[in-house]
Amino acid sequence: MSKLAKIVVVLIFAGIFFTAYSYWKSSYTSNLVNTHIYQADMSRYVHRGVLDFDTEGKEISFNDRIASVDNRFFNGEKKEALALYILLLKEDPGNMSILLRLGIIYLQEEDYTLAQDNLNTVYGYKESVYALDAAWFLALMNYQNNNIPTVKTLLTEIIKGRGNYFMEAEELLEILT
C-alpha cells in the first residue's frame, strides 16, 4: 500500500472516530437527562412504614393516603396516581409533597406547562424541604427546552444547598461547562 493510500485510510478512520465521538458526546447529556426524568426516584418521597395498613376500625391518615397513591405510581399506574394526587391536593392545596409528585408526573408525561406550574410552586416556597428537589426537576425540564443558562443557575443552587440531587447536579453541571 502506498504512502498516500495509508494517509487516506488513516484520515477516513480518524473521521469516522471523530464523528462517532461527536455523536456520543452530543447525545450523552440528553440521554442522561432523560434517564433522570423517566426514572425519577419517587421513593425519596415515600412515607416509610405506612405502605401497608389495616383500615378496619382506623381512620386513614392523609400521609397513609399519599403512600397508597405512591404504591399505584410505583406499580405503573401513573394516570390513576395522577388523578388521585389531584384529589388529595384539593383537600390540602398547599401540600408541597403532592405538588412535587404532580410536577414529576407531568414532566414524565411531557406536559411541560403543568409540570412547570407545579414545580415552580414548590421551588418558589423556599421553606419547603422539597424546594431543591423541584429545582432539580426544573433544571431537567429546562435542559429539554434548551435553556442552558437557567439549567446552570438551578444546578448551582442545588449544589450549594446540598439538595437530594446535589451529586447528580454536580455531574450534569460539569458536563455542561
Image (spheres, rainbow, N blue to C red):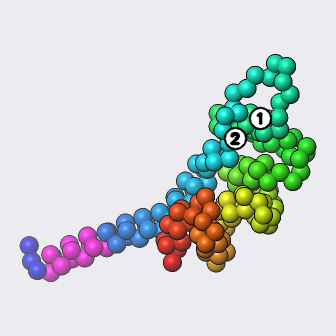
Q: Position of residue 122 (x, y in %)?
A: 78, 60
The reply to whether residue 144 is in sight is no
Q: Quadrant of residue 110?
A: bottom right
Give the camera-side residue of 176 and 52.
Answer: 52
- Looking at the image, the residue that sits furthest to the left is 1
Badge 2 marks a residue whose secondary structure is loop
- Looking at the image, the residue that sits furthest to the bottom is 4
Quarter of the figure that contains the N terminus: bottom left
Placement of 87 over or under 173, stated as above or below: above
Magenta extent: 4-15
Q: Is residue 143 magenta?
A: no
Q: Which residue is mark 2?
A: 47
Residue ID at (67%, 59%): 133
Q: Position of residue 164 (x, y in %)?
A: 61, 58
Q: Earlier in the sequence, mark 2 or mark 1?
A: 2
Q: Which residue is mark 1?
A: 64
Placement of 128 over or under 92, stated as above or below: below
Placement of 79 over or under 20, stated as above or below: above
Residues packed near mark 1 inside 10 Å, few (<14), some (14 to 19) or many (20 plus): some
Q: Position of residue 42 (x, y in %)?
A: 65, 46
Contact between marks 2 and 1 (CB within 8 A): the answer is yes
Residue ID at (83%, 30%): 60
| Dominant SS in magenta | helix
The reply to whether residue 35 is in sight is yes
Residue ID at (79%, 54%): 96
Q: Quadrant of residue 82?
A: top right
- The residue type indicated by label 2 comes to His
Residue 8: mark in rendering: none
